[in-house]
Image: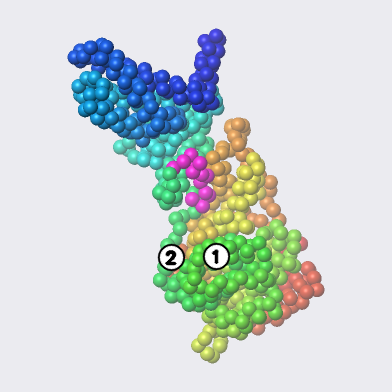
Amino acid sequence: MLKTRYSKLATNFALDIFYKRRILRRISLVIIDIIIILFCNFFIYWNSKNFALSNSFNLSIFLISLGIPIYLFTEQYKGLTKFLNSFEMYKIIIRNLFLFLLIFLISLFDFVELPATRYIFQILLSISGLSCLTKLIIRDLLINLSKSKENKEKTIAIYGANLYGAQLERILRRENSYKILNFFDDNKQLFGRNLNGLPIFSLKEVAKYKDQIDQVFICVPSIERSYLRKVFDIFRDNNLPVLQIPSLKDLTENDLKISHLKQIEIEDIIGRDIAKQNTELLSNAIKGTVVLITGAGGSIGSEICNQILHLKPKELILLDSSEPNLYQIEKTISKMNIKETIITTILGSACDKNHMRRIFSSNKIDIVFHAAAYKHVPLVEKNPLVGIYNNVVSTRLICSLVLEFRAKKFILISTDKAVRPTNIMGASKRLSELVVQAFSQVSENQVDQNRTCFCMVRFGNVLGSSGSVVPLFKEQIANGGPITITHEKVVRYFMTISEASNLVLQASVIAKGGDVLLLDMGEPTLIKDLAKRMIHSSGLSIKTQKNPKGDIEIKYIGLRPGEKLFEELLINAKSFKTENPLIYRAVEESFPPSKIFPGLDKLERYLASQDIEKTLNLLNYFVPEWVRKK
């Protein structure tokens, strides 16, 4: 007990000198250097025995009188000893070489009686070596003393026995709150070896050491998404929270720092590697055209804007009813500084007939991407008339204007919820698809060659979009949980915003008219697995009965109105491959214009009179697969 007490006092005293009392720290370092000079001088003396003890003593006084002022003048004692690096070692050697050169010049004028030059060189060489060694020992002692004082360190493992892993380990070693246990890697040639004195283990040994590890840092900046997912899942299965260093590009622009460690984005560990676009094909279709994007401030709309800008259209017209969203996309685009394209931002509703007509009459629009829609299932379920009006009426209005003003192409952004819908939002999007197909039939019957190509692109959930569960889960994690999931078996398809927008653009080029184009969404994902991945990617652990000390709990709250366990992309299971392996063309039945247009007239009257019952009955007539809940 007494020993521990004295140990703490000694630790506090040492830390107090080196951190709080600058003068005492410098005096201590000067005294250490004086002792080193004396020791090295007399050590060389005892080995050489070629000059008298008195001369050795005089030389010591001379070296101290000349060396210490040089050390002070060159700021040797200003650096933080705890963060000493190899560069500081070189500076110590350079100072002593300068001191040797100065002494050599003095010896030429016989101002002072000095031993042979080789003895002085040996002395200064030994001073340099011992000084570097002493400062390294002090540095490591200070690091260990700081750790023992804090006594709150986390045990860390690093995945990636490479240059960045070694650099990160050195940084973490200086931190008060980290203890590095080992490295993990998948390179068989590294197994059984060590890096910076720490062992390197295989990923197969993670389970063996998981109880000793609090967190894992992935230190491979250029790792592929598919392999990152595999590595991440290994640590996730062992309930180990994970953080990652930035991309290789970010690291080349800045030195690696502990603050650079970041959460793994869910886009990096779910879905596929982003599909490469046929830039030449897209550029030929977009370059020099006037493009209108409705819902331009939304998640999909804004990303389509970003990608289209790089294809150099003549003018890009951005329409959105949300002032904050429109402001945000305008600000983002202005930073891109693309001078070849005119950017026009318009605040307004895609349902406003006069407003939309003025837009079309004032601009020779070539291509329209209709991304504006109400898509939050529970909200549309509670506000059916507004949801149907916004989704269906806007589609009909813009299609009619596209046809009237002879635009080249119209693309509806649809959803997998339109397939056998169980909610009003999905049913309204299915009716919107039927509207587009009806206008396509009208266009095909036109005699002239300037026909408008009407098509729609249908896909599932987009990671990070406003309607996705990802923002909700992120908010719940930030608030400390719990994460709420409607059902343990809920399954969804997921795609990144960038990939979905890219494929929408490619689909617009492939479209021939009346197409229902489906995006290959990859493998479906259990929502509970998504939640678990997001918890671990945030550097946290899951709280369960087996792990009561975990950070975030997952709770199941039951299916919401209109929600189903899984989503589909096909209505009648008939689809064909296109030029792009990730885009399919579906063959689905539709209503003729003579039947759907009078029905839409009725729908608009029912909506205007706020007749919910008649509106829903008519919607159910056009979308009979929607099982309406009375």
Visible residue check, residue 306: yes
Q: Secondary structure at mark 1?
A: helix
Residue at image point 68% right, 71% down: 349
Q: Which mark is residue 535?
A: none
Give the colour scheme of this rendering: rainbow
Picture quarter with the N terminus: top right
For label 2, the residue is: 277
For label 1, the residue is: 334
Along the line of sight, which residue is nearer the eye, 527 or 306?
A: 306
Along the line of sight, which residue is nearer the eye, 12 or 325?
A: 12
Question: Residue 606, how many percent across, how many down?
Answer: 77, 74
Q: Would residue 70 appear left or right of 626 to someone viewing this image?
A: left
| Magenta region, residue range | 256-268
Relative to 201, is 268 above or below?
Answer: below
Q: Would residue 510 appear left or right of 475 to someone viewing this image?
A: left
Circle 2 crowding by C-alpha within 10 Å: few under 14, some 14–19, many from 20: some
Disc 1 to disc 2, how far (Cα)? 24 Å
Picture quarter with the C terminus: bottom right
Q: Secondary structure at mark 2?
A: loop
Question: Residue 537, how many percent across, how many down?
Answer: 53, 44
Along the line of sight, which residue is nearer the eye, 20 or 275?
A: 20
Residue at image point 56% right, 55% down: 463
Residue at image point 69% right, 69% down: 390
Residue at image point 53% right, 12% down: 6
Residue type at numbered disc 1: Ser
Question: Residue 545, how many percent across, how many down?
Answer: 62, 33
Question: Residue 382, how many percent across, how many down?
Answer: 75, 60
